[in-house]
Image (tube, rainbow, N blue to C red):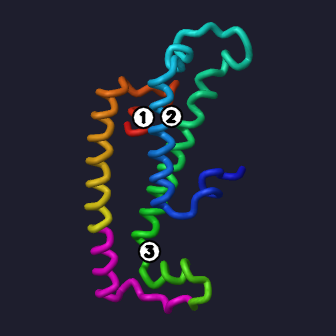
Amino acid sequence: MINIGQALIRESTHAIAYAFAIMLAHQLILAATPLQEYVFYAPRTDLLSANREGLLSLIGYFSLQLLGIGIGRYLYSEMLDPDLLDVLNDVKKPLPAQKPDTDLAYRRDVTKRERRLLFRMCIVEALLIAGYLLSKNVFGPPSRRLCNLPYVLY
């Protein structure tokens, strides 16, 4: 199965930015139109109305997928050896020599990258929590049926 998000977006920072832009647009459309009431209260009379939750939440789940892709790529690129990351970005460069795991300087470098990444992820988590609390107060509770902004940030 083709992953649409990975096919369209190459840079992790772009994936995260697109995810938030799409999610914000989705939430604003939900807030400005009667779609929320339609999802929760409309009768199920035909095929479209019977599947309204799934159809209207596709955009929200797509943005959630983009967010996961962006964060995953960011984590992966931050944990890679900088020499290997240069090789992955420039195909013409030769692979660097393998560094032994017993090399103390190499192990310290990996530990330093892990600590820096952990600190950055704590900051990102704090921002997501603050965004969730703010969006919950502005747009209402999270809803799996709508896949709204509070649900994605939760």
For residue 64, side relative to residue 109 (left or right): right
- Which range is magenta? 95-114
Using the rendered view, name the quadrant where residue 139 is placed: top left
Q: Amino acid at mark 1?
A: Leu
Check residue 11 for magenta coloring: no
Percent from the top left, x then y, of residue 110? 34, 76
Nearest to viewer (mark 1 / mark 3) = 1
Check residue 105 for magenta coloring: yes
Q: Is residue 37 above or below residue 56?
A: above
Q: Which residue is mark 3?
A: 80
Rounded to the nearest whole Å, what is the CA distance between mark 3 and mark 2?
A: 34 Å
Q: Residue furthest front?
A: 32
Q: Amino acid at mark 2?
A: His
Q: Amino acid at mark 3?
A: Leu
Q: State which tag comes first along the sequence, 2 or 1.
A: 2
Q: Which residue is mark 1?
A: 149
Total numbered badges shown on the rendered structure: 3
Q: State which tag comes first along the sequence, 3 or 2.
A: 2
Q: Which residue is mark 2?
A: 26
Rounded to the nearest whole Å, what is the CA distance between mark 1 and mark 3?
A: 32 Å
Q: Secondary structure at mark 1?
A: helix
Q: Is residue 151 above or below residue 116?
A: above
